[in-house]
Amino acid sequence: MSSGATTQQDGFPNESIESSGFDSSNLIEKLLTGLAFFLLGLAILPLGLVISYVIVKGLGRFNLALFTEIPPTAMAEGGGVASAIAGTLLMVGIAAVISIPIGIGAGIYLSEFSSKKIAKWIRFATNVLSGVPSIIVGIFAYSVVVLTMDKFSTLAGGFALAILMLPIIVRTTDEALQLVPKDVRWASVGVGASSFHTVLQIVIPAAIPAILTGITLSLARAAGETAPLLFTVIFAQSWPDGIIDETVPSMSVLIYNFATAPYQNQQELAWAAAFILVLLVLLASALARWFGQKATY
């Protein structure tokens, strides 16, 4: 009797139950995986549509003149966005000079030298700053720089973009340094190096690829901002003259102005400029991903 019960217990009925249970869980797993891919496709679809539409509309004016000529006047034909590219690079360069040293220095202080209580509040303030709308940053830059200098200027535009770049650089630098293993620091201190030399010669070089990732992403964001520049510089088609010039062309403001213009030539240039900005953002994202893969801890 016991032998028969054992045989029945170890026989096919129980195996079929286990097999049926395995098939059911496998089916649920496949359904959830399919649902996840479907939702991922829905999330990516708007991005794909936007990029495709910009490429279709902007590719027709993608030629050499686009990068060598200045934007045309209202009813003129032809032209390009060369001066707007130069103005954008100038203001982003000013923003980088201001924000990168401050951001990296703040990130190093947070990760290596600050107390936990101070670091907690500074990280909170950085997170809040990263969520501030760009138009508020533009108003702040207008109040601090434009009203103080009593004029619009390239410097004011770069200052506004630097504020937008700063929290990204601080957060990525802080997180990059925290990812460096503690054992590396202890080994350096154990052979007689000071904390300052350990951070400067061991920790920072190990975190440079991740820090460069944050810098690249912040530059991409600054290049595409429009609202702060509406409060800090006056748009013009001519070439920029310097950091205190009142009239400075920029890609984002050119798109904002020309896209709503009643002239087809300017609308086409707006789409071409948008295409260039999309390419810059894609390039920056690719560089950020490449720098991130180079990080070794």
Image (cartoon, rainbow, N blue to C red):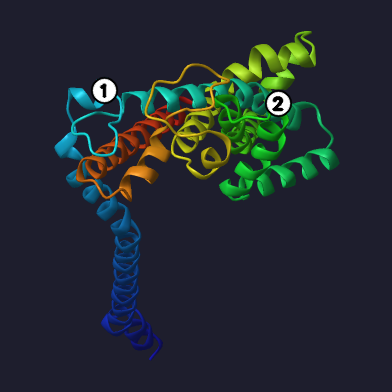
In the rendered structure, which disc, 2 or 1, sits on the residue that comes first in sequence? 1
Which residue is more in the foreground, 47 or 258? Answer: 258
Residue at horizontal 68 percent and vertical 42 percent from the top: 140
Which residue is identified by label 1? 69
Query: Which quadrant would the C terminus be assigned to in this image?
Result: top right
The spot of residue 266 in percent (x, y) is 26, 41
**Residue 297 seen in the current view:** no
Residue 103 is drawn in which quadrant?
Answer: top right
Query: Which quadrant would the N terminus be assigned to in this image?
Result: bottom left
Residue at horizontal 78 percent and vertical 16 percent from the top: 195
- Give the CA separation, mark 2 to mark 1: 43 Å
Which residue is more in the foreground, 192 or 40? Answer: 40
How would you rate the neighbour count of disc 2 (Cα within 10 Å): few for under 14, some for 14-19, many for 20 or more? many
Q: Is mark 2 on a helix, strand or loop?
A: helix
Residue 291 is drawn in which quadrant?
Answer: top left
The spot of residue 202 in percent (x, y) is 64, 15
Which residue is identified by label 2? 108
Residue 284 disc label:
none
The spot of residue 185 in percent (x, y) is 71, 21
Which amino acid is tagged 2? Ile
Above-or-below relation of 7 to 70: below
The spot of residue 79 in percent (x, y) is 23, 29
Residue at horizontal 33 percent and vertical 51 percent from the top: 260
**Residue 290 seen in the current view:** yes
Label 2 vs label 1, nearer the camera: 1
